Image (cartoon, coloured by chain):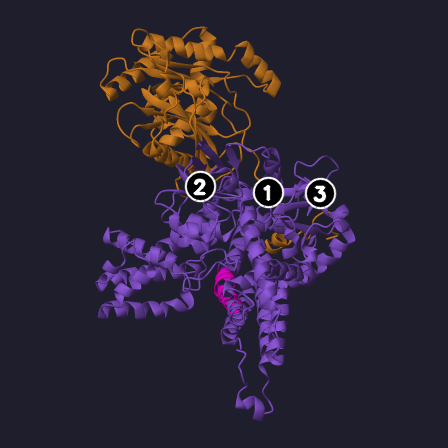
Amino acid sequence: MATTTARPSAFPSPFAIDAVDGCEGWQEMYPYYAVFDERRRDTDENRFWFWNSMHFPFPMPAFDVICIDSPYQAVGSWQNRVFAVPPAMGIDYRIVNGYVYISGNPVTDPEKIAERAEFFQARAGYYYANWSELYGKWQRKMERLIAELGELQVPELPEYEADEVAYDGERNTAFYEVLDAYGRVLRLGDLMWQHHFEFLLLGYGAHATFAEFCKSHLPDIPDQHIAQMVAGIDVLLFKPDSELRRLAALAIETGVDGAFASDRTPAEIDAELAKSESGRAWLAELEQVKDPWFNMATGDGLYHYYRNWIDDPRIPYASLTAHIEALRGGTSLERPTAEIALERERLAQEYGALLDDGARGPFEELLALARTVFPYVEEHKFYCDYWFLTRWWNKIREFGALLTLHGFLEESEDIFQLTRHEVSTALDELVLTWATGGVALGPKHWPPIVVERKRRLERLAAWTPPPAIGATPDVVTDPMTIMLWGVTTERVQEWASHKDGGLVLNGAAASPGLVEGIARVISSVDGITEVQEGEILVCGSTSPAWAPIFPKVRATVTDIGGVMSHAAIVCREYKLPAVVGTGRATAVIRTGQRIRVDGSTGVVTVLES
Amino acid sequence: MSIAAGADYARALSELSSADESSFGGKSAALGELLAAGVRVPPGFALSRQAFRLAREQRAMPQVVREEITLRYAALEELTGLREPPVAVRSSAVGEDSATATFAGQQETVLWLRGVDPICLAVQVCWDSLYSVEAVRYREHMGVDQEPAMGVAIQLMVDAAVSGVLFTCNPLSGDPSMVAINASWGLGSAVVGGEVTPDDYLISKVTREVVRERLGAKTIEYVPDASLPGVALRDVPAERATARCLDEHALTALLDVARVAERHFGCHQDVEWAIARTGAPPENVFVVQSRPVTTVAPPAPVTPVSAISLVMARFGVGKPGTGD
């Protein structure tokens, strides 16, 4: 992924980072293989690792480690074992003080690369040639998977088994059913991650190739124009917000918009609506919309605490309130899809016409391919990260409720403080003692562990991880690191040169424009509702799930991410200046500071402290 | 006044086309082309190489040429309704402004002249510049062995509030979808002569948005000298020096000029322009010269490739050492 030379690194050694004060022994929360270990020091110390703050901006709760293992099992399987991307195998991860660092495994042997190229050309070629058909299959596969997850029952442990168990001969007892259901829910998660990555590399690769082609032949083309030429018009990800706009208009039409006062909670709004006939009609309409459109996550989905809009309606209700206010103020909320479609074609034609004859052909072909793959690039996140994952966490919560009922946990959320293997162990003991009628040790064993881990995570959350550790690479060549995380040679050099901190941050120019304003640093989902009109959003990584917030902010700055991230796409749609991949914006910038964001040059300046 | 039969000493700019380049020089011919394309060019006339030859033979301003100047300057007086309107006199060397050589800075431009006598003197200065030490050396260096010849363009002055240069592509990156504009206060000599750091704008031809802008320190400006012929140099107050000198309307008008010029000539152009103090864009936006861009970065080499092979290369297929 990256070649390094033997000289002092600009980044700290992973073995030189001390445990955060009061968090000594944090490693016990994680699998033995997930930490830097002396027995692997020779290789690990000489590799370049960067903090994957795009997917893991917060210290990992023990259970959530499954969202590191599964995705990297899946992405490596497709990249390394199915498509055999010639120069890159999979991605290794290590946890430091609760934070996830990653490093790609390169293929360096030219013969091996040539051998892999044969596989890659045949297999990736097949996917590109049959993309739409394969993607159609994929969507049905995902819908079946989500349906199966919904049907999966977490059994109870009854005082006496039902008659059917006694007389039927075909039915299993609850001990088996509980263990089977838990095993099945874990496997369904693995399946989702497998599907998630089936198209991801190839989709991003085709899109990135088009973007790169544009930039080599039209060096000054704004990223936004590239995105506009490719982006779909009627994509799934815009659907939740467009449903909210429709509901806002309906509220005004039916005269129930008075219920949406900004100082009311969603429950208070619901209570107000329930008082009138037309209010109840509006609520019924809302119920129709919820499945599937409220399966948006309040965050990027990889942590258990990102709920969907059904479970945490604060974001959609805040949006509804804002939309109603805008409509009352005479603002049209209609997305001008016809105009967007026309502009998309006009841009493609004009840029095509400006190119040399030799470049026009590849430009048009690459654009067509990028448009073919783009529905997956945009939509997989809704199916996988939001719709499936938020429901999957809820299924885990049901096991949490079962363990709580039997005294193993104080509350069902505590299940996320145990590793998935510890949950398996706890369930083993639970069904054993349920069966034997013996005294369970679990209620004495698990709660103190949960308390200690919660305390640790809270302290670890205050730590600022360095953007990179280990060896400093001379060049970053791994196509995935560049495409998915925006970690390029230049970015690494910027991180290395800014290690002492400073008032100027460099990142990727993701959406053009220059603004100054007050920063709002958001590190958790609760912060979203704190964002005030006209502030500049500063966060680990932007996410399309935060869409309702974008009409409010003036610009966006993130720690990590490339111009290809879903986030950047939404930012451009809203015409907000954005600088992504600064490495340390959330560490350097504080809420309330005045900052300048230049989305055209990728520079963020802290103007006053 | 009579003009010798068959002699073609002078013509209105509007009567010139690229076919006249060999007699009137590239600059004058290009101005004729721009007028034909509908671009606003200050009215004026041009002197041919025949006028120059005659002057060499007579070792003085030939009477017949002086008569042409007098006649045509009078037409400009009539056109403007002004007595002795100010004009610029610029050399238009034959072979100059071609795509391969610029002869840049080798010839003269004299601004803000009023009356036939000063104009004739300035024309003489332009002719003489062909034999300056620098010009002779330049021709030797470039291997130009044909007998040099010089045309001259005489145009009404634009009393410019702002002036500058534009390229119909980004000359640094070679991006053909961009128009690059440098602009500064006053007459154009400040930008052309590199005496100020101009405002620097990059504008998308496709969406007309300003993709990048860097405001310069435009600390001086050239303005007409009230008391004397010619121009005066004056300091620009600090506040105005760093202020943006082109608004959205002016930028749009210049973008349109760029697109017309590029389309008309069929290649990228380096255009000198001026925006008059009176009027509003686009009516007060004038082009004073246009020539092919000679310094643009070469476009990325285009070898026939399929889209899929580019995608494969992105994943490391077909890179050196892969055996493909």
Q: Position of residue A122 (x, y in %)?
A: 67, 62
Q: Distance between the residues labelled 3 and 1?
A: 18 Å
**Residue A307 seen in the current view:** yes
**Mark 3 or 2 closer to N-term?**
3
Quadrant housing residue A191:
bottom right
**Mark 3 or 1 closer to N-term?**
3
Using the image as rendered, state which of residue B188 and residue A304 is in the foreground. Answer: A304
- Dot 3, how many residues are within 10 Å of its Cα: few (below 14), some (14-19), or many (20+)? some
Chain seen in purple? A
**Residue B3 seen in the current view:** no
Q: Where is residue B22 in the image (x, y as percent from the top left)?
A: 48, 25
Q: Which amino acid does label 1 sit on?
A: Pro
> Where A430 falls versus B171 (above or below)?
below
Q: Where is residue A24 in the image (x, y as percent from the top left)?
A: 64, 48
Residue ID for mark 3: A3
**Tag shown at residue A467:** 1
- Cβ atoms at labels 3 and 2 below 8 Å apart: no
